[in-house]
Amino acid sequence: MEDEKIYKVIELVGSSPKSWEDAVQTIVAKAAKSIRDLRVVEVIKLDARLEDGKVKAFRAKVNISFKLEED
């Protein structure tokens, strides 16, 4: 059928020294350079890397989906 669509979901992890939102934006921007037709990003987990008792990097783990191309 022509309306049937299939999407692939991959898990990615990114970080930012600024914020969790920036970490997610970084993931999406990097993925968009090599994957076409990105559809949805789902944030799975947020954490932060600490150094000397201070936050050094905000990290995000996401699932990102994209449409599989037709043959």
Image (cartoon, rainbow, N blue to C red):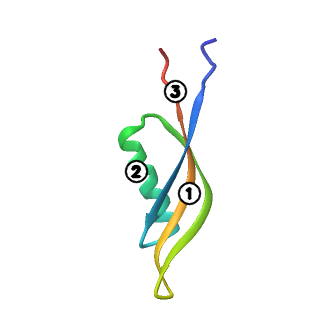
Label 2 packing within 10 angstroms: few (<14), some (14-19), many (20+): few
Residue 4, image x and y in percent?
Answer: 63, 19
Circle nearer the viewer, 1 or 2: 1
The amino acid marked with disc number 3 is: Leu
Report the Cα–Cα distance between label 3 and label 2. Answer: 19 Å
Residue 28, image x and y in percent?
Answer: 45, 50
Instruction: Give SS at disc 3.
Output: loop
Residue 17, image x and y in percent?
Answer: 41, 72
Q: Work out which residue is located at the far top of the displayed protein and give it.
A: 1
Upstream in the sequence, badge 1 or badge 2? 2
- Say which mark, if any, is on residue 68: 3
What residue appears at the point 60 percent right and 24 percent down from the top-left corner? 5
- Image quadrant of residue 45? bottom right
Q: How many labels does the image show?
A: 3
- Say which mark, if any, is on residue 20: none
Question: Circle 1 sits on which residue?
Answer: 61
Residue 56's place in the image compared with 25, above or below, is below
The amino acid marked with disc number 1 is: Lys
Question: Circle 2 sits on which residue?
Answer: 29
Circle nearer the viewer, 1 or 3: 1
Report the Cα–Cα distance between label 1 and label 3. Answer: 22 Å
What residue appears at the point 45 percent right and 64 percent down from the top-left corner? 15
Instruction: Give SS at disc 1.
Output: strand
The amino acid marked with disc number 2 is: Ala
Q: Work out which residue is located at the far front of the displayed protein and give it.
A: 52
Instruction: Give SS at disc 2.
Output: helix
